[in-house]
Amino acid sequence: MKKYTSISDIDDLESIIREARGLKSHNPEYKVGTGKTLGMLFFNNSLRTRLSTEKAAKLLGMDVMIMNVDKDGWALEFEDGAVMNSDKAEHIKEAAAVLSQYCDIIAVRAFPGLKDKEKDESEHILNSFQKYASVPIVNLESATGHPLQALTDAITIQEFNQVERPKVVLSWAPHPKALPQSVANSFVEVMQRLDVDFVITNPEGYDLASHIKKDTRVEHDQEKAFEDADFVYVKNWSSYESYGEVLNVEKNWIVDQAKLKATNNAKVMHCLPVRRNVVIADDVLDSDNAIVIAQANNRTYAAQVVLKRILEC
Amino acid sequence: MKKYTSISDIDDLESIIREARGLKSHNPEYKVGTGKTLGMLFFNNSLRTRLSTEKAAKLLGMDVMIMNVDKDGWALEFEDGAVMNSDKAEHIKEAAAVLSQYCDIIAVRAFPGLKDKEKDESEHILNSFQKYASVPIVNLESATGHPLQALTDAITIQEFNQVERPKVVLSWAPHPKALPQSVANSFVEVMQRLDVDFVITNPEGYDLASHIKKDTRVEHDQEKAFEDADFVYVKNWSSYESYGEVLNVEKNWIVDQAKLKATNNAKVMHCLPVRRNVVIADDVLDSDNAIVIAQANNRTYAAQVVLKRILEC
Amino acid sequence: MKKYTSISDIDDLESIIREARGLKSHNPEYKVGTGKTLGMLFFNNSLRTRLSTEKAAKLLGMDVMIMNVDKDGWALEFEDGAVMNSDKAEHIKEAAAVLSQYCDIIAVRAFPGLKDKEKDESEHILNSFQKYASVPIVNLESATGHPLQALTDAITIQEFNQVERPKVVLSWAPHPKALPQSVANSFVEVMQRLDVDFVITNPEGYDLASHIKKDTRVEHDQEKAFEDADFVYVKNWSSYESYGEVLNVEKNWIVDQAKLKATNNAKVMHCLPVRRNVVIADDVLDSDNAIVIAQANNRTYAAQVVLKRILEC
């Protein structure tokens, strides 16, 4: 694996899932990362991603250096040809090239601004690191994708699946703030590559980008979508059509036990953090239907298999 | 040891002190913490606690992951059943359960708000971690206790003691800000378990909680309390009776050389940070009476013995 | 080496440069830092210094503990005899003494205020750590010097030099903010000790302190200074004479390809971060003349040789 910036960097999804599940049950003594350094750069806050990736790297024997870039370092300029006489002290060209000398892999978290669709879709932060760094880049959630989460989700579905071809529903949920489409996008991309019956359900106005959803079925009636579902993946995202907006939605799209009745006793997933009783009700999160904690645990092994593949490359 | 959230988690105080002093003079090659991870979560600032605990863990061979929770992660909700449609992004239920999968021990610093006695005494942050985490919790100073400091203090008193049954005085001191009772509480609890002549001295209105001081003698005349003292432990705390308030005090309770004259050339202790010439005068801190630096050094070994005991459990 | 707070702590400049270049090509298996701890204290932001020093310490086998002092710890008091009843919670006397027990080497970054020349020149932060710590101090850029950068610069010049006695020009450059003289000062000090033809060029009013520049030639005509230069070291600094001020300068002192024409195809250096098209033009930074990335790489080996020498002491 040369880098891991999107789900499309995985050639052999089944084999990577198998390897991750193997690492989970038996972590090898042999440390492929000994003497190697992972640099983790955060432009935004993080709990799970930060700790699970740090842990994964250390399980491989790597040293880890963490920077909250804008808080602890210098504000970065990304525009080519900029005259830097304002608030940005360092250009990505230098920052990425220098970091490539201190680190063997650079991992970057950079959320979208959700104001300018074109700018967000250009992935200017992630792609600038890719362009100017000379070491592999790992995406810790970018403007439009969260491929470590999506790999985790695929691992978790395989782990909990008990039927031949499960029905998986990605359900939009309410949220007081405008959130990125990143998690949903990458989840869609990975589901499209597994042998599952995959449906997206969201209110009108919340359809994901057509280049993401492709020919995946979108059902605007949540109840109908939930029928016989084996897995319900719950996640809020802001509108893609009315870019970055939080639209008025008539019904309450929260996932609770009442709605699960139509499902095949579905397992309920969420990337976390989850707002209780807004996104998912306590009666689901505190029940056996919820597998969000086991799902979060798989973050470590998804990160480990990705870092391992990159180091072995 | 199953956890270390209060002094009462220590069954064998004498033996744990002996073991800590042994670690100080001879740190074993054998690393009981190899392959284990300590997660340190800070809801408040820290210097000594952070660095000494990090060092202790590394002396045991552990990996250490540090989070300034609210700054680097997500604001946490602690109320059961909360509808999370405001500023809190993650519930402690998920946070603690997830962290338990990434860490083998979770250490938490969470100061009291000093506004609501009942809430502080419920130790809602520390106890929520205990309730929802599946790994042992270590208290890095909570709303009402600082047991790592208290163990350090016991180690230090045994180390410096030169008489059969020393007189130990806990003396309140002035401070411009309202501080927790945590350090004083835990110090009282540990002194009650050592074979010492223990006296608390503080102005009227500053008596510690009766469930803490129990039948320990409280002397409101500082001069009288200091007579023949072998150890003077200096610490400010805000009023417990007039909860969280800084009361007017007529005399100046600062500890200086003039006041030490009545003592048995007492050793002077403080948990640090100490405000010079407010809490303790330069003429004491810069003299041989002060053992605050040696005391701070023992923080490492107190933390090490606690982590070691937990790992061996 | 007993400490590294200024270039004058190096006795044998040629040999230390040789050793650093050796570490770069072959990093020994033997870890002189095993079981030792580096404490890094930041009073100001840092990217390169932080990551390269952390990496250097880990290459030596050291554990590294990093504190953003004022953000994560307690505001420090530096005045002797201060009555600490205001915003400073801890005196440097205690902080330095305590840290000396947790760390084997303490590294400190503390920029000048640029308001009070006398205070800045007293190096009160760095020197207070030296005075009150009992372990060696390493300067990560202080009020008046940046000796790790200067050693890096000497290594880099030796590495890229192709003539017997190169002409090295330190050129002042424009910048929107008032910056310290630290990098320029230490660069001047190290150049004075190498066998180079060294010239400083800066606008009138920007001469460095006379105790720094000594008898080094200062040329106020940039074009003239650049004639036949082999190395051009570009750096902004605020006025020393009109202390901390940004003065009006008539010509544009930016370094671009047009200005390099007079040089001997000079290599262009900068400590980074560099403001593109303000300090140095894109046409230089994106050309083979710029060696700023290779220079930044040498930060690791400069730090490593310094830490190694201190550990071996």
Image (spheres, coloured by chain):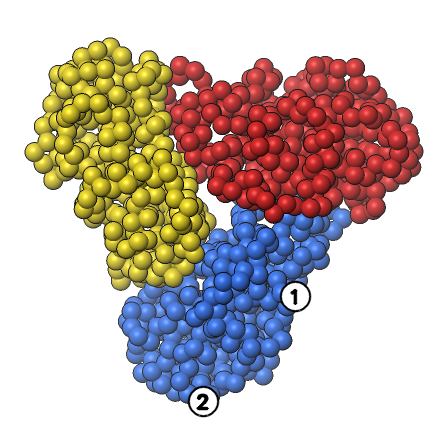
Chain colours: A blue, B yellow, C red
Q: Looking at this view, name the residue that lies furthest to the bottom.
A: A164
Q: Residue A129, can we see it?
A: yes
The quarter in which the N terminus of chain C is drawn is: top right
Task: Specify the subunit that label 2 lies on.
Answer: A
Q: Residue at x 38, y 75 (%)?
A: A268
Crowd tier of the residue under label 1, counting other residues whose Cα lies within 10 Å: few below 14, some 14–19, many 20 or above: few
Alpha-carbon span between mark 2 and mark 1: 34 Å
> Tag 2: Cα neighbours inside 10 Å, few (<14), some, or many (≥20)?
few
**Towards the viewer: C85 or B294:** B294
> Taking C227 as reference, is B124 left or right?
left
- Residue A29 image point, x, y percent: 49, 62
Kind of element beneath mark 1: loop
Q: Quadrant of residue A75?
A: top right
Q: Looking at the image, which is closer to me, C134 or A300?
A: C134
| The C terminus of chain C lies in quadrant | top right
The residue under label 2 is A164
Task: Residue at 86% x, 30% y: name it.
Answer: C166
Q: Which residue is mark 1?
A: A313
Q: Which residue shows up at 57% across the image and 55% down it?
A: A34
Q: How many marks?
A: 2
Q: Amino acid at mark 1?
A: Cys
